[in-house]
Amino acid sequence: MEFDVAVVGGGINGTGIAREAAYRGFRTLLLEKDDIAQATSSQSTKMIHGGIRYLETWDFHLVHESLRERWTLLKIAPHLVKPFQIVIPVYKGSVRRPWMIRLGTLIYDLLAVGRNIGRSRRLRSEEVQAIPGLKKDGLLAAIAYPDAQVFDARLCLETALSAQEVGAVVLNYHPVERVTLENGHYRLQGTHLRTGAPYNFSAKSVVNATGPWTPIFERLTPGHPTKEMVYDRGIHLVVPSLGITEGLALMTGDKRLIFVLPWQEHYTLIGTTESKFEGEDFSSVPYSEEEVSYLLDKFNAFFPERNLTRGEVLYVYSGVRTLIAGHESSLTRLSREAEINLMPDQGGTAWMNVYGGKLTSYRRLAEQAINKLARHVTPSGPAPPRFTASTPLYGGRELVDIPPDKNPAFLTPELRDAWRGRYGSNWAELVDLALAQPKLQEMLLQRFQYTLADLAYMVTVELAFRLEDLTFRRTKMIYGLTENETRKLSQALEQFLKGQDWDSLYGEAAS
Ligand SMILES: Cc1cc2nc3c(=O)[nH]c(=O)nc-3n(C[C@H](O)[C@H](O)[C@H](O)COP(=O)(O)OP(=O)(O)OC[C@H]3O[C@@H](n4cnc5c(N)ncnc54)[C@H](O)[C@@H]3O)c2cc1C
């Protein structure tokens, strides 16, 4: 079969474009070399936001568009995107005065008009007092504005599964190693990492959505000009919950914003840093202890009594933003606007490079990419955008409950809540699975309410293959797993995979 659109890269841009293409009726293929969201798209600050600080660089268009998309994502993925409030404390001596911050948040409100999720406001003094440990000395004002938080890796995964639901072929662990242009179509070749078998696909158009790998991927291909990229590394710390229930945006002396965010009930997230990255291994971007100390120092300057230490940090993750090189001297001032380049090749084929972007605006970027590409794929021109803004993502449909009299004995209230939180509207599929195969009711990790049914579902439905697929991208167990728990999970995964016939699961699409 020849695909209309082959998307390479299973980050948020690639999965979003695959979903959009599939919804417009194109025969769509998505190839990811590792796991879905293994790179930048699981290393973010996890905010679905307009980006209040982009107001300072006059990126009003970016902020406006992102705020509209924030509204859309809250509707189509309510189980993954949750509204929350961010508070900016303003101290004596800050270059940004309280009135400037207030003005900024008012503009932010205005840019969201018609699709806002609340209003910005100045906090009352008792509300400020209630923020545990925040330095009150010299505090002039605290201004709050609404935004939203997301489980980034699952947003990406569920976007891919949503594309699959409407006919796209979605294959992770399929690195594209070679692309040639032959007789009016592209041939994409590589090796399926699960089976070791070579694969070979043909497509009318290719979308290079490999994020930071864009120039590297171009080296394997028929040769298209790429833009000069700059890689901006950002790290985050995960620490046990500091009791903060709202997000905080801390204005540091070096004109940056550091976010301190409640995360997954039991944790607090602190980030991010900004430093130029010059390597090529974007799968595991290294970080330095200086960067960790920088975040701890900045945090402790605002929470002096808390005195957070390195020993309390449970997890550090690091990723790179891919920015288009410009004339600005500082990384912070380079634009976050995405760019899409379409390059028609011979015989009606078309190649597209995608640069930059945000999790927040990925759906809109995908719509624009497919608008551009569609006239090359179909002679009649682009089909109108349909449904991706109004159709719920994979688990984003209405939550349906099981009547109490039909509640199976194994389904404790704790497990029910864990499944609803993890899988949204698909949680009942886990119940069916565990009823059909009672062995799967076995609790594997009590602390995380993680059963054999979770493992089976993540492997067979959610495309998981390696341990980190389960612990970092489909759940956040990685922050708290003990050695024993890791061993137990790893053995169960190995056992489960042994019983799987990969050819029957994945062989058909790859032949
Ligand atoms: C520190 C940091 C914080 C951020 N915070 C936010 C935030 O709070 N909110 C927000 O909206 N945005 C945020 N962003 C931006 C957002 O995370 C990125 O814009 C987005 O994740 C980029 O997605 P992508 O699909 O372009 O790239 P990636 O997620 O990196 O995906 C590219 C994929 O291509 C695959 N690939 C590469 N080569 C091949 C090949 N040959 N064959 C097959 N597959 C291949 C890779 O394995 C990878 O999975 C943040 C970014 C960073 C770095």
Image (spheres, rainbow, N blue to C red):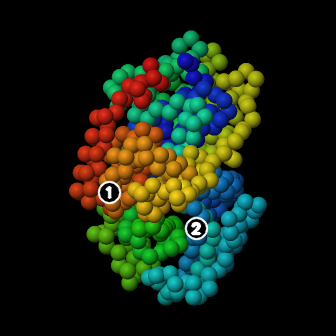
Q: Quadrant of residue 505?
A: top left
Is residue 444 in view from this perspective? yes
Tell me which numbered mark, 1 or 2, is placed earlier along the sequence: 2
Element at badge 1? strand
Q: Which residue appears at 70% of the width and 42% of the height?
A: 387
Q: Which x, y percent locates residue 317?
A: 38, 56
> Where is 129 relative to 200, above or below?
below
State the image quarter where residue 297 is shown: bottom left
Per the model, the C-alpha gap separating discs 1 and 2 is 30 Å
Please name whichever residue, 508 or 19, is drawn nearer the observer in this view of the structure. 508
Query: Of the residues shown, which amino acid type is indicated by label 2?
Result: Phe
> Which labelled disc corresponds to residue 84?
2
In the rendered view, tell whether residue 136 sits above or below residue 481.
below
Judge by depth and name the residue closer to the eye, 188 or 424: 424
Return the residue nearer the eye: 258 or 408.
Answer: 408
Element under label 2? strand
As drawn, 393 above or below 58: above
Where's residue 121, x and y in %?
67, 77
Residue 188 point in image, percent of width and height: 47, 22
**Circle on res. 445:** 1
Taking the spot 66% from the left edge, 45% from the top edge, the residue there is 391
Q: Amino acid at mark 1?
A: Leu
Vertical side of 478 occupied by 490: above or below: above
Question: Would you say the residues marked 1 and 2 are in contact, meaning their CB atoms lie under 8 Å apart?
Answer: no
Q: Nearer the viewer, mark 1 or mark 2?
A: 1
Q: Which image quadrant: the C terminus?
A: top left
Residue density around tag 2, few if under 14, some if 14–19, many if 20 or more, within 10 Å: some
Q: Nearer the viewer, residue 506 or 307?
A: 506
